[in-house]
Image (cartoon, rainbow, N blue to C red):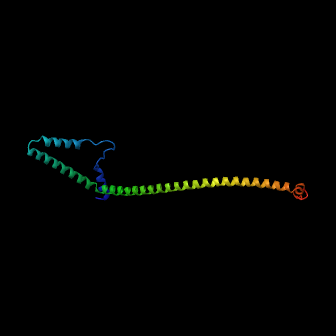
Amino acid sequence: MSAIDKKKSKMNITPPIKPPRGIKPTKETSGLLISVIRALSASETNEQREIEKAKLEKEYKRSDQRLEELVSLHDQDLMEVMKIFSALSEKVTSSREKIHAVKENLNACKQLLRCKREELLNLWLEGIEHKQVLHLLKDVSSDSCGRMISLTEPELISNTLHDPLTDQ
């Protein structure tokens, strides 16, 4: 029998059915447990309790055997699922670590941008101040040049160069 034939024969056997999410499982197990507890508490003799205990052990062994059969039947599938889950778990862990590192880097960049923003604001304010100072200097220099030209006119020069002794 080839590997494909084995796989096909395994496919004919229906795998266990996973209950849908969000739907609570039936209460067979709790109902069974409650009925066992009632039977044990209602039994008056140790013999009846032993019978109930033997029934429980028999059912336990049967379910354990069925579980073993299913596990051995789907051994390869279970191993493959475990490997896939392990790989996915590692990838998720790695991705979470990377996301954490990215968040830290983003916070550091955000802080640096805040610092640069403050620095740019200060430089902008300094630029405005320098512009105002330059404007004032231009005003002062244009006013002083105009005064210098008006002072160099000949009539003003003669007035400023007169001898104070002659005025007496």
Left or right position of 83 against 97 = left
Q: Residue at the location (64% across, 53% down)? A: 125
Judging depth in this view, the residue of 24 and 155 nearest the camera is 155
Q: Residue furthest front?
A: 168
Say which quarter of the image contains residue 133.
bottom right
The total of numbered circles placed on residues is 0
Instruction: Identify the residue at horizontal 74%, vertical 55% (top origin).
Output: 137
- Of residues 29 and 160, the one nearer the viewer is 160
Tell me which residue sits at (10%, 44%) in the image.
48
Displayed quadrant of residue 22: top left
The residue depicted at 22 percent of the width and 43 percent of the height is 30
Residue 94 image position (x, y, % from top left): 41, 58
Quadrant in the picture for the N terminus: bottom left
Q: Is residue 17 left or right of residue 131?
A: left
Q: In this image, 110 relative to 121: left or right?
A: left
As drawn, is 127 to the left or to the right of 23? right
Relative to 51, does residue 71 appear above or below in the rendering? below
Horizontal and vertical percent position of residue 61: 18, 51
Could you tell me residue 47's position as x and y percent? 8, 45
Viewer-proximal residue among 66 and 29: 29
Looking at the rendered image, the quarter that the C terminus falls into is bottom right
Q: Quadrant of residue 2?
A: bottom left
The spot of residue 44 in percent (x, y) is: 9, 41
Q: Is residue 159 above or below residue 46?
A: below
